[in-house]
Image (cartoon, coloured by chain):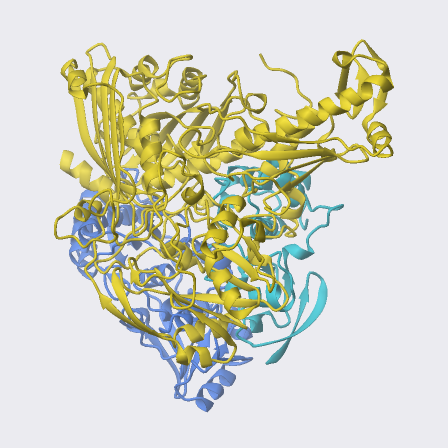
Chain colours: A blue, B cyan, C yellow
Amino acid sequence: MKCGYYTASTIEDVIARQRAHPGKSAVIAGGTDILLDIEEGKKNADLLIDVTQIPELNQIEEMGGRIRIGAAVTHAAAEKSSVIQRNARLLAEACRSVGSLQIRNIATLAGNVVSAQPAADAAVALTALDAEIEIAGQDGRTTIPILKAYKGVGKSAIDTSSQLVTAITFDALNKNQGSAFIRLEQRTALALPMLNVAAVTALNPDGKTFAWVRIVMAPVGAGPVRAFKAEKSLKDAPVTMDAIKAAAEEAASEANPRSSRLRGSREYRLEVLPVLVRRAVAAAAEEVPGHGLCLEKEAVRL
Amino acid sequence: MITIHFILNGQPVNVEVMATDMLLDVLRGTLHLTGTKKGCGKGECGACTVIMNGRAVNSCMVPVAKADGARIDTIDGLGDPDHLHPLQEAFIEAGAVQCGFCTPGMIMAAKALLDEYPDPSDDEIKEAIAGNYCRCTGYTKIIKAIHIAARMSNGKGGV
Amino acid sequence: MMKDYNCVGKPEGRLDGIPKVLGRAVFTTDVSLPGMLYGKILRSPHPHAKVISIDTAEALKYPGVKAVATSRNTSQVPFTTAGAMVFTGPQGRPTLDQHIFEDEVRYVGDEVAAIAAETEEAAEEALKLIKVQYEVLPAIYDPLDSVKPDAPDLHWSPFGKNVAGAVIEMKLCRDIEEGFSQCDEIIEETFKLPQIKQVQLETQSAVADFEADGQIRVVSTTQTPHCAQIQLARIFETPVSKVQVKNPPFIGGGFGVRIGLSAKAEPIAAALSKLTGRPVKVTYSRREDFIASDTRHGGYITVKLGARKDGHFIALSVISRLNGGAYCSFGTETCAVMGAMTMSVYSIPFRNYCGTCYYTDRTPAGAMRGFGNPQGMYVVDSAVDMMAEKLGIDPLQLRILNSVKPNDPTWINPYPCTTALIACMEKGAAEIGWKNRGKVNKPDDKKRIGYGMGIGTHGSNSFPASVDYSYAYAALQQDGSLQIATGVPDMGNGTSTTLPQVAAETMGISLNQVGFLFGDTESTPFNIGSHASRTMFSAGSAILDAVKKVRKQVIEYAVPLLESPAENLDIQNSKVFLKDNPDKFMMLPEIAWHAHIRDIQFLATGKSEPANLPPWHAHFAKVEVDMETGMVKVLKMVAAHDCGFAVNPKIVEGQIEGGVLMGIGNALTEELLVDENGVPQNDSIHKYMVAMASDTPEIIPILVNCDSPVGPFGAKGVGECGCIPTLAAVANAVCDATGVRFTELPMTPERVLERIRKAE
């Protein structure tokens, strides 16, 4: 591979370099996606700008109920972080399911979002957390909701020749909120998922009704897909398996999976999706202590 | 060409490389250390596992520029015929070595695990080496070997 | 009765263990020679096409390029990469349907040209500058299409349209229909199997040096150095004695992918070396290894099994139509082994087999661990379970009733049938908890447990079907240590430890006194190589023969020195002593030196005798099926093996465990797919579902001893056996859990769920 490599020390450093090579540079964090893309001719860059040594980008912080994950934080660091395990358990589980430990030790959550792959596990969990992406660019700083980061399959709205992700933020889950991440996979490591589903459920204080639910499904569209109609159907609904089952069927109707020769036909994915959504929502609801109702014991780990 | 400085198996090293050469090719080619193997070149098999700043990584996917200033540990610096590392002894004792091609990467992944978790469970071991492909052993004796190595070190850290 | 041995039968640590754990073991991909160039290969993007023209002018000009090889400037001698070229016996003729570069390409990946350059990058860049004009032709991918009248003829074949190699027919009775007419129940079903891949960790690789004096020296990953030597000699029209092939000495796995040549690595490296006058290294990328080296045969197998109400099997017919891919390779042999094995497990009076291998425009299929046996037994043992269900008999009891018993005449003569299969079945059943079968699931369970079993046999070498012999030599060194040599490799199966164990035990010395030369045609006598689970049985027999002769020479030499008749002398722990007065002895080093200064060394050659013995195995699987997603999880596998005598039980267990996991992959997750343009879809480890450590179930190997009249210390073959009955065991377990029979592998979640839904 023939391109230049620059290791930046500050965010401003990155922006200056990008300015000096308009349209010809690309940000590299872990590199596990971009190096393969360049090798296979899917992406081009004259200069790779490494952001992993910028101290500000390596932090995981919790401030006033808001979690902030720097853009250089690896999947392994996120998985092990007590901040994330305490406040966003499904994200720790999603990170844990990516690739292999060697890949998790170097690949970043920000990279997982920017690669814009439909079933990127961390991005799916972050979507269920209603995360926001902080971006620095030539024109200063902006923040976008995570779903706005996706323009199409493999097409990020973030242009890494002129911008960089600086952090991902979301609200920490509180004690009335539970989460779950389920991955249907042909192999427990180094395999893209056939389907992955993330759910965050907030129960009302009486534990008998849902306050709100977020359901994210993938790969059933260009990026992670929120099942908005299903979510709406559960607002203030009773916490029962019947309600969850019905919502799961609704969620599947909002999905549009392709047929994959390697990872399941569209028909199979549509058939199994309600099962996974049902299990994820039920598992998330069960996480809330004192939910008050006896839910059918659902297996989450497949 | 640039000059990269790093600590390799405890010794300082300077090499002149292209920044985007992969660490694996620098180790095997420029530095003639062929202990670390290439099985796929895409980060999918773990044969090229080395430990970088205490973490197991696929060296075939690490641009050598990332190694600048880092601590890199490879199989070439682990043990010698008269003083085997407990993992090396355990792999032989348990029968965890067959063709031997996955062995260097597997041992380094296991070492990174034991350095941080001196007494891992079966599941923790499986997760740590899930990125190290082996076709010969069915992994069964490899998992046993890592338990034996952990016991040999009495669950003490930093083996 | 178990004899107490000093060295064999013990789980000795591997002699190659220390170099391997230190990363100092040398593999072909580690080899570098002075002046070495790197070879890269241009491959067809089309599944079937004629090569109209190749323009290499631009490529030749690329900086660092030293030669471009095409069919125009390389050997056109036809060959097959398969060792069948060398070990097809007098009863057949190998199909030589390959060339180094083809003018008609027959699969995506077929070799068209190659470049040798100073660096790998230069070679890869220059490849892009070779301009090839193709005339695209119609392509076929399924053997059922190969026989259609409008299917393109992929090769000229004397055996029929698109038939690769001779059709194998085994008519083991006068009239099979007469047999079926005597049956109360008949099961008939057709099964579909995938092509799968060995995915050994070291890709195909060779370093070749075509020297100025005409000698060709090759270091490569071949499992059969002597066969490769003969093949290369033929291709380059050079005397065999001027060709050297060796492993350096280790190989990163094989599993059949390189019996003979390592795909085209050796011939292309040699061709480039001939053109450049420098050593050339060709190492396949992982993608090339996936798409352009032999796979396992998939295809269609039809079984018909008939039995009486009381459970006795009366008639069995197996018909296989295999997908041979673009070149014949081991197509004929695979059909033959499938027939031999499926016909030999159960005592059935009326038996019939017919196997045909068809050409298609896919990656060629060839040898892979088990060699037709796993496929065949999946089908036969599925039928046995179907029969068990029909007759209302427990599948274990049905197999105990019908399986071959000790001293049963098998149709494959001239070797006897020693078997501990019943013991394998009983021990395996106890360990898996067979009595729980049918009792663990509740009607509403969304996750259901199932138990299944499969049995089988194999060979301990390929006699009498193929040429199969080993020579060895042994020499007592001047200090009393022992040098042995034979041409087998060590590809992980432990031969560099177990053969010295045989030698040490036979000579009466400790293991660390044995030096072993292996895998090198220049320094070892002929050995057909490591395949057919033959290495211990056959190479071990040759080693045993040679060492016995050396031992006899030493004892005879010691007769006057110790003043004792030969019958009263023994050797143990390097001590030659009188049996009735052990205090009277001489140490071997003393005797060896005594002889040396009188101009004598003790040395001999040995040979394996033509013989074969079947090993036997019974596998039991416990699985859990998620009825809502179709996901199958194997919870536990028990693998009980009669391999006669385990020279090194730890190594044998390791072989079995690896084979079991390979078989699980074959049953549940592994398959090679092509799209409508013949482009392989699984060209990386990421896209091909081989198991990782986190997928491993509990695997319990059980070694069952069985007295055997031949073989070193009674050892039989085991290398391939770990994956033979696994497919059936897992498939039968999934059927037990779901109540649904699966006739297509792998049992992916989608296929499982589809069948469950259909049955509901």
Residue A130 vertical position relative to residue C425 in the rendered view, above or below: below
> Would residue C713 be visible to someone looking at this image?
yes
Quadrant position of residue C103? bottom left
Residue C158 vertical position relative to residue B52 in the rendered view, above or below: above
Q: Nearer the viewer, residue C686 or C57?
A: C57
**x and y percentages locating residue A39 in the rendered image:** 42, 71
Q: Nearer the viewer, residue A87 or A128?
A: A128
**x and y percentages locating residue C565 in the rendered image:** 79, 12
Q: Nearer the viewer, residue C582 or B13?
A: C582
Q: Nearer the viewer, residue C361 or C701?
A: C361
Name the outermost residue toward the bottom.
A20
> Would residue A64 be visible to someone looking at this image?
no
**x and y percentages locating residue C590 in the rendered image:** 86, 29
Residue occupying the point 37% across, 35% down: C634
Residue C686 vertical position relative to residue C635 in the rendered view, above or below: below
Quadrant position of residue C41? bottom left
Residue occupying the point 42% across, 20% down: C414
**x and y percentages locating residue C28 in the rendered image:** 56, 55
Q: Report the number of numbered marks.
A: 0
Is C286 placed left or right of C484 in the picture? left
Name the quarter where the C terminus of chain A is drawn.
top left
